[in-house]
Amino acid sequence: EDCPWLPHRSSNRSTSNGMVAVTRTSLLLVIVCLWGEASAFVPNSAVVGGDASCFVGAKGGRKATCTAAPRSSQHKFGSANTGAAFSLRMVGGSEGKAGEEGENLRAEQVLRTLMSVRSKESEKVAVVDRMMGMRQTNADAMQELLDAMLAEMNGVSPVWCTLRWPVPPPSYRAKLGVLSRMMVRVLDGETEPRRQRSAMAQFMRQLSTSRGIWGLEREMITRTKRQTSMKEMLDRTPQDLETPKYTVEKEFSDWEIRNYEKFSVVSAQMENSFGPGTFNALAGYIFGSNKEGVKMKMTTPVINTAGSKMSFIMPSDYWQDTQKSPTPMTGDVKVETSDMVEESSTLAVAWFGGYATKDEVDKRKKTLLSSVEASEEWDLVNPAGDPYLLQYNDPFQPPWKRRNEVVAPVKRRAPAT
């Protein structure tokens, strides 16, 4: 069913001839895709070095000897200022194993190692750990690496390499084609470079524990088809992180009424709608950047209030008495009882997966408000209020593993007189 070009079984001769023709065509396409890619069948550890890749070093330096792909002047993904030097179609091999101590990370090395089923999991984890370390110590270098990886993916040719094959060919270019298909699917027309880099980083993180790029695509297709029920959302919730306690009072098809217990949060105003600085400030407080130097366990979800304030859930030890909480380093960070439960502990909640983009969140908020207004039992506490956004997963989770919710305080509707 995944191969529309293959005819259904039949005993007549025309079908048999058709199958032969399809088989020959498929074989021809595989040959075209593999043409000139001698290193496609060689394990990563055995590939001989070449000068066809760009790398980003500890200080973000780039290697100048890059081979440009003939069709790579048009970027589908990545920053437009990446330049022709990063628009590559690989014609050589990587230099040894990506992730070895003291070696620079190269776009091709990272992709070859993480997309392959032949790479050891320890090698994959080492590469991703180095990428995460780069993100913490040299964000510019991480951005350059992700841009180079996006350009590497864009440079895949010919077009046959981007098709979905009945049997996955062991070709590096074909794997880049899989990555390109997945990127198109999860971004759904999104063109913002930050979103594209984030999606690439998420894929790389997932590949560190998966059976190669083909297996990851199968997982994406399977999980995307699942109904986004509350059971599915609970499966997507990190099991090792503490979360506010609640009971479900009423269930509907795609939303529910919950009664929450009181809990406290650490909050800060967001400098813009994205707020990476705010996120880092709150994470720093949780991980020990407070006057007492107390390190706390991470919790979930992260709460966004009207696009202007971000809050992390405090550990339950501080829910009843916020005065016991460690003291923030600055007045910009405050520990407080969550305003989400101040107006009412009864909340209407609608869930959804995928990326919590502004357009998607606005749509979900409007749907939730309409659902409450149309109900016969519940009223909004503040009809003019803006619902809260709750995000349960770390930034490196792919969209098919994410749990998001929009929340509005409600009250039981007074009986008609």
Image (spheres, helix red, strand yellow):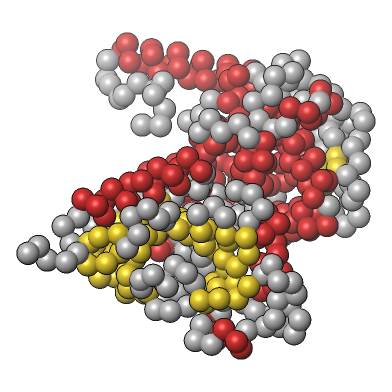
- Where residue 104 sits in the image (x, y, percent)? 88, 47
Judged left or right of residue 10, residue 219 is right
Q: Seen from this angle, which residue lies furthest front?
A: 417
Image quadrant in which you'd find residue 66: top right
Image quadrant in which you'd find residue 416: bottom left
Q: Is residue 298 above or below residue 271?
A: below
Q: Seen from this angle, which residue lies furthest left?
A: 417
Q: Is residue 108 above or below residue 229?
A: above
- Where residue 367 sits in the image (x, y, percent)? 33, 46
- Write the residue at 56% across / 33% down: 190
- Where residue 265 sits in the image (x, y, percent)? 55, 73
Residue 3 visible here? yes
Count of all numbered marks drawn on residues in the image: 0
- Write the residue at 73% across / 20% down: 72
Residue 391 visible here? no
Looking at the figure, which quarter contains the N terminus?
Answer: top left
Looking at the figure, which quarter contains the C terminus?
Answer: bottom left
- Where residue 137 sits in the image (x, y, percent)? 83, 57
- Write the residue at 62% across / 84% down: 325
